[in-house]
Amino acid sequence: MISIRAFAERYFVDGHWLEAARIEPREAHLPALVLLHEGLGSVAHWKDFPCLLAEATGAEVFVFSRYGHGGSDELTEPRPVSYMHREAQIVLPEILRQANINRPVLLGQSDGASIAIIYSGTFPDSPAGIILEAPHVFVEDMTIASIAQAREAYNQTDLPQRLARYHAKVHSLFWGWNDVWLDPAFRNWNIESSLDHIRCPVLVLQGVRDEYGSAEQVAAIQRKIPAAEAMILDNCGHAPHRDQCAATLSAICRFMRVIPDCSLSQ
């Protein structure tokens, strides 16, 4: 194991304080990897993956908790259906500006992957590449069914206690996510048009056992971006970086080598 120094940071963005952490690069010429978490994620919820990613690639790794998540400010209002667009078009560009990160490789999981798509379609010259774990570009019946099951689990099991390990304000966090996804208006949410404007290399990682989305999400992305590389992972659910960590890290290292002007040390 190499020595990795991580620094805790806070940023005031779009009226809210957001927690963040940064791992220094071993290879200064590489683009920073910016991690965008899932709908119930946070800095802490990534666990040791940011350190493993920094060790594997040598790149700077930057991770933050969105408003309402982790140790960031508590969510105090219902989320609108357009919340991922606000995160992609207002919050993400501003936190990257404040963190002095240019031309990043965005690595998003679930909601975070969708935010990466919207951002890359809005600001096509900004990202050096995007890595999409279990992305959503449209709403599937299976997604809604699994989110409805999560509501039952939150009310009937120890899920609140388990989520409290990663979030300071767990109730507002959970209901902010669950309520908007189960809002009937959300069934028409679709970001396939954002794919038309993406110019950077794209890697998609999808688990065969993902309970929140199917391979149809991958197919939709590749219809719009035929050059997008896709890996369908066996024995893998909604979080490839947890369920298939070694394969995910290997795929990311290979992907980093195809980014223009970017090469990993051998």
Image: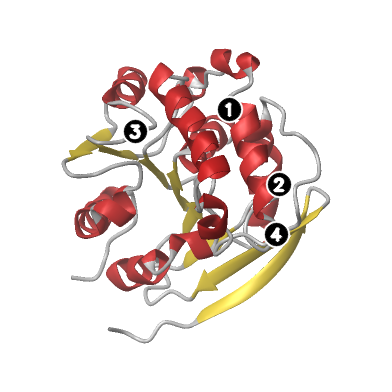
Residue placed under numbered mark 1 in the picture: 181
Q: Position of residue 74 (x, y in %)?
A: 75, 53
Q: Which mark is residue 211?
A: 3
Q: Secondary structure at mark 1?
A: helix
* Residue 64, quarter of the rendered image: bottom right
Q: Tell me which residue sits at (61%, 65%) in the image.
A: 20
| Separation of residues labelled 4 and 2 (CA atoms) | 12 Å
Where does label 4 land, which residue?
A: 72
- Colour option used: secondary structure
**Residue contact between numbered discs 4 and 2, judged by CB atoms under 8 Å:** no
State the residue in front, 242 or 55.
Answer: 242
Which label number is shown at residue 172?
2
Q: Is residue 162 above or below residue 91?
A: below
Instruction: Name the residue type under label 3.
Output: Glu
158 or 132, which is in the foreground? 158
Circle 4 or circle 3, nearest the eye: 3
Type of amino acid at the residue the image marks with label 4: Ser
Residue type at mark 1 is Trp
Q: Secondary structure at mark 2?
A: helix
Residue 39 in sight from this viewpoint: no
Query: Mark 2 or mark 3: which comes first in sequence?
Result: 2
Quadrant holding the C terminus? bottom left
Q: Looking at the image, tell me whether mark 1 or mark 3 is earlier in sequence order.
A: 1
Q: Provide residue 40's location: percent of width, then percent of height.
A: 54, 47
User: Could you say where residue 15 lies in the image, as x and y percent from the top left?
Assistant: 83, 50
